[in-house]
Image (cartoon, grey):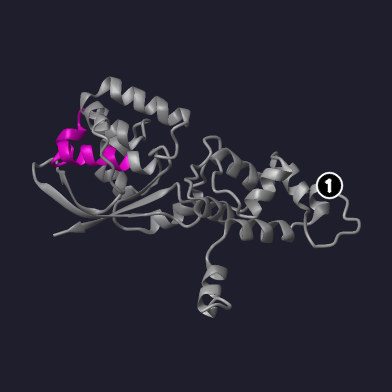
Amino acid sequence: MSGARPAAEQNGSTLRPSLGAFLRARRERLRPEDFQFQRGRRRAAGLRREEAAQLCGISVTWYTWIEQSRTTAISRETLHAIADGLRLSRAERRYLFELSGRTDPTPAGTPCDPRPLRALVRAIRTPAYVIDRHWDAVVWNRPAAKLFVDWLGGRQERNLLRYVFLDPSAPRFIVDWAERSRRLVAEYRADTAGNESDPVRRELLQTLAAASPAFAAAWRSQQVLAREGGLRLFATAGGECSRYEQYTLRPAQDASLKLTVLVPQP
């Protein structure tokens, strides 16, 4: 039977997230004078497509195709250019990459700011710490420093992987170190998959692979795991075992940071 499509089908296509619709709405909300363009007489509000393309450093034709959803072959570099050119917020930038099916690594030159989390971490009564995109500890509380004496208790080296694989005390302190360390490498691989070009990541991998056969073997295994919680066991000075349930959270303000909280278990 011929005729118009059912209303539900039409509504479904309208409600489906569209990269083109998102970019068009964003462009129309921007004021020309904020970008040193003459407002003049315009048929529609916001920037013209050629102005948006100029700000993004791409051709008008290519920008038009993207906004009209006529292509899905959009590189990360182009997405970065669009995010910067249209001055997208952090949330808008993340949404842009999600709609494009791409991973948006935090630019290597953009440092995270863990300061807003300090009060939260200090308020937690059990061991808690925050690591950044390089897995360097940037915030921790006193219980964490007391538990991880050789990592957070005064040493200059704050990288979690360097501690686990290069500190001679780690295999004695972390119960079932061989399995825990392998899982840690798999979690790091998954967590930093979009940062292949990050020079800090490359240097860390090269250093660990050269200094630790265990790390080199774990990295060659290509295992991938999500950063997860679960039971963690640590050997105490008296030869006993302390048990913690680990919870790992990502702050909404900066997804490149990870907050880990260890809750003592009987």
Q: Residues within 10 Å of mark 1 (few under 14, many from 20)?
A: few
Point 14% across, 43% down: residue:
236
Q: Nearer the viewer, residue 42 or 145?
A: 42
Can residue 100 be seen here? The reply is yes
Q: Nearer the viewer, residue 205 or 125?
A: 205
Decide if residue 82 is on the left or right side of residue 212. right
Name the element at disc 1: loop
Residue at image mark 1? 36
Can residue 86 be seen here? The reply is no
Point 47% across, 28% down: residue:
199
Q: Is residue 175 magenta?
A: yes
Name the outermost residue toward the left.
Answer: 239
Horizontal and vertical percent position of residue 75: 55, 40
Point 45% across, 29% down: residue:
200
On screen, 38 above or below 59? below
Q: Is residue 105 magenta?
A: no
